[in-house]
C-alpha cells in the first residue's frame, strides 16, 4: 500500500488497471463520470460535486482516497458506503487475476469502485485522482468534465520537483474535447494547462474568470458571497465545511456545476445552495477543519503539505485565541519546509501514525527543534491530544494536523469520554 510504505507501492503505468477492468467487462464505461485532480482541494471539491448531484436527484457514485476510518469510504453511492459482502465477493471473484498480475492495493480498490458503481447503476460518478493524474489508475475513464483544483509541491519524488512538472502530470487527465476546469491561476502552471488543453482541443475554464468570492464570515460554517461574473448575480452560500480555504474550492465547484448545467444536467440554484449547506451529511466528508470540541476549540485538519498547512494557518490567523496547541505528525517522505512554516509560539505535541511510513515522533521532535518548535513527544495521537486538552484553557485552540493517517487514528468516542471526565 502506498499509504503505508510510500513510493515502493506506486505503480507507474495503467497496465494492471486495464487488465482488471477488462476482466470485469470495463465497468467504467457503463456510467458517466467527473474526474477531479489537484494537489489540495480535490477531496473537498469531489464531495461538493457529489452532494450537488445527489441533491439534484442523480444516483451518484463517489470514489475518493485514502479512507479515514473504513475502507468502504472509497466507494459510496448517494453517500452510503459499499456493503462488506460486496467487497468480500469482489476479491473472491478476482483472486486468480490478482494472484497472476499482482496489482497494487490502489489498483484493486479503483477496479472495485468502478465495478460497484456499474452494478449499482449510478447515473454519474465523481472520481478523485489518487496521485498525480497522467499515470493514476483512475485515468482510464472518459469523463463528462475534468477538474484540476490547484498545483503545489507534494510527492515531488514521483511527480517532479517544480510546479511546472507537477502540473504536467496533473494535466494528464485532460481528454480530447472534454471540458476542463482549473481551480487556480498560477504563473508557473497556467501555460502548461493552456498547452495541454489546446493539444486535446479541450475547452478550458479558469474558475476565477467566472466567479469571485466577495466576502465571508467564519463560524462553525462558512458564509461566502459569490458573484457570477458573466451575469453579475450575487449569491450567499452557506457551507458546512468551515475552512477558509474552502472559498477557493467553492469557486471551482460552482464553475464545474455551471458547465454541467450547460451540458444538460438538471441542476438548479436551489440544488447548489441546499447541497453546499450539507456536504458532510450527504457525503460523509471529515477531517477538513473538523471541529470536535469548543472551549477549547479542537480541530482535526488533514493538511499535510506546504500549501495545505499555509491555508490552515491562514484560517487560524482569522480567529481570536490565547494560546495555540498543535498535535503534529508527518510521514517520512515530506520535506522539512513544512516545519519552517509552523508558528514558533505554539506548544507542540509531536506524535506518529501507526504505519511504517510515519516519521518517528522522536525524530520529528528533533527535526522540529532545529526550527525552534518545542514540545513533548507521544507514541500515539490519542495520548498527545489528551495531554493537549489537559494543558489548554477554554480560549485556546488545539489543532491536530500533518498527516491524514494521524487524523484517522483519533478515537472520537474515547476522546469524548476523556472530555467528559476532564470536565466532570
Image: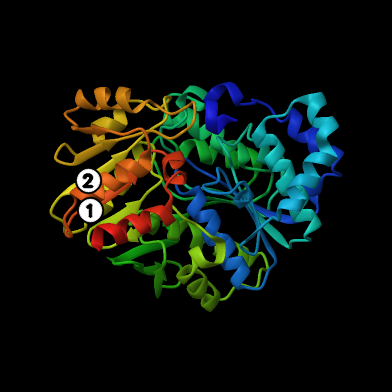
Label 2 CA crowd tier, 10 Å (few <14, some 14–19, many 20+): many
In the rendered image of this protein, does residue 78 appear above or below residue 314? below
Residue displayed at 55% across by 35% down: 132
| 362 and 142: which is toward the camera | 362
Q: Position of residue 373 (x, y in %)?
A: 19, 32
Expressed as whole percent of the image width and height from the top left, the position of residue 313 reads 26, 47
- Looking at the image, is mark 1 or mark 2 earlier in the sequence? 2
Q: Quadrant of the N terminus?
A: top right
Residue at (70% x, 60% y) in the render: 124
Q: Which residue is mark 2?
A: 325
Give the left or right position of residue 408, taking residue 320 as reference.
right
Q: Which of the 4 image quadrants contains residue 295? A: bottom left
Question: Which x, y percent locates residue 315?
Answer: 27, 53
Residue 83's tag is none
Disc 1 marks which residue?
Answer: 397
- Tell me the CA gap for discs 1 and 2: 6 Å
State yes or no: discs 1 and 2 in contact (Cβ < 8 Å).
yes
- Please identify the residue farthest to the bottom as the structure is shown: 270
Residue at point 76%, 45% (across, down) = 88
Dividing the picture into quarters, in which one does residue 196 lie? top right
The residue lying at 31 percent from left, 32 percent from top is 338
Q: Is residue 123 left or right of residue 394?
A: right
Answer few, some or many: residues within 10 Å of disc 1's Cα (few below 14, many 20 plus, some between 14 and 19): many
The one nearer the camera, 373 or 182, is: 373
Q: Position of residue 99 (x, y in %)?
A: 80, 26
SS of the residue at dot 2? strand
- Say which element carries label 1: strand
Asked whether 424 or 215 is in front, the reply is: 424
Amino acid at each position: 500500500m502506498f499509504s503505508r510504505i510510500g513510493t515502493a507501492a506506486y505503480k507507474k503505468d495503467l497496465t494492471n488497471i486495464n487488465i482488471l477492468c477488462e476482466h470485469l467487462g470495463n465497468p467504467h464505461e457503463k456510467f458517466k463520470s467527473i474526474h477531479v485532480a489537484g494537489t489540495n482541494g480535490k477531496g473537498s471539491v469531489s464531495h461538493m460535486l457529489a452532494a450537488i448531484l445527489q441533491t439534484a436527484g442523480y444516483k451518484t457514485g463517489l470514489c475518493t482516497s485514502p479512507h479515514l476510518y473504513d475502507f468502504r469510504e472509497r466507494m459510496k453511492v448517494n453517500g452510503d458506503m459499499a456493503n462488506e459482502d460486496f467487497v468480500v465477493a469482489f476479491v473472491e471473484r478476482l483472486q486468480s487475476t490478482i494472484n497472476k498480475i499482482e496489482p497494487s492495493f490502489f489498483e484493486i480498490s479503483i477496479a472495485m469502485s468502478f465495478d460497484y458503481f456499474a452494478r449499482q447503476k449510478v447515473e454519474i460518478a465523481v472520481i478523485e485522482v489518487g496521485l498525480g493524474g497522467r499515470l493514476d489508475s483512475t485515468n482510464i475513464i472518459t469523463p463528462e468534465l475534468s477538474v484540476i483544483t490547484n498545483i503545489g509541491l507534494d510527492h515531488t519524488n514521483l511527480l517532479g520537483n517544480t510546479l511546472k512538472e507537477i502540473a504536467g502530470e496533473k494535466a494528464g487527465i485532460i481528454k480530447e474535447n472534454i471540458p476542463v476546469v482549473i481551480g487556480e491561476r498560477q504563473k508557473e502552471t497556467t501555460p502548461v494547462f493552456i498547452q495541454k488543453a489546446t493539444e486535446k482541443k479541450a475547452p478550458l475554464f479558469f474558475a476565477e474568470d467566472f466567479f469571485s468570492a466577495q466576502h465571508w464570515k467564519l463560524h462553525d460554517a462558512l458564509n461566502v458571497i459569490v458573484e457570477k461574473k458573466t451575469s453579475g448575480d450575487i449569491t450567499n452560500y452557506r457551507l458546512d465545511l468551515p475552512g477558509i480555504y474552502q472559498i477557493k474550492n467553492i469557486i471551482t465547484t460552482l464553475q464545474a456545476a455551471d458547465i454541467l448545467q450547460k451540458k444538460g444536467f438538471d441542476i438548479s440554484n436551489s440544488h447548489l445552495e441546499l447541497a453546499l449547506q450539507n456536504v458532510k451529511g450527504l457525503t460523509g466528508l471529515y477531517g477538513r477543519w473538523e471541529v470536535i470540541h469548543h472551549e477549547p476549540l479542537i480541530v482535526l485538519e488533514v493538511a499535510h503539505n506546504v500549501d495545505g498547512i499555509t491555508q490552515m494557518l491562514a484560517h487560524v490567523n482569522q480567529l481570536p485565541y490565547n494560546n495555540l496547541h498543535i498535535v503534529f505528525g508527518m510521514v517520512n517522505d515530506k520535506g522539512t519546509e513544512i516545519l519552517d512554516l509552523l508558528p514558533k509560539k505554539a506548544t507542540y505535541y509531536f506524535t506518529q501514525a501507526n504505519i511504517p511510513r510515519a516519521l518517528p515522533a522522536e525524530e520529528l521532535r528533533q527535526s522540529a527543534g532545529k526550527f525552534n518548535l518545542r514540545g513533548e513527544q507521544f507514541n500515539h495521537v490519542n495520548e498527545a491530544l489528551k495531554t493537549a486538552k489537559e494543558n489548554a484553557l477554554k480560549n485556546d485552540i488545539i489543532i491536530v494536523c500533518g498527516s491524514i493517517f494521524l487524523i484517522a487514528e483519533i478515537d472520537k468516542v474515547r476522546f469524548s469520554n476523556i472530555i467528559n471526565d476532564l470536565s466532570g
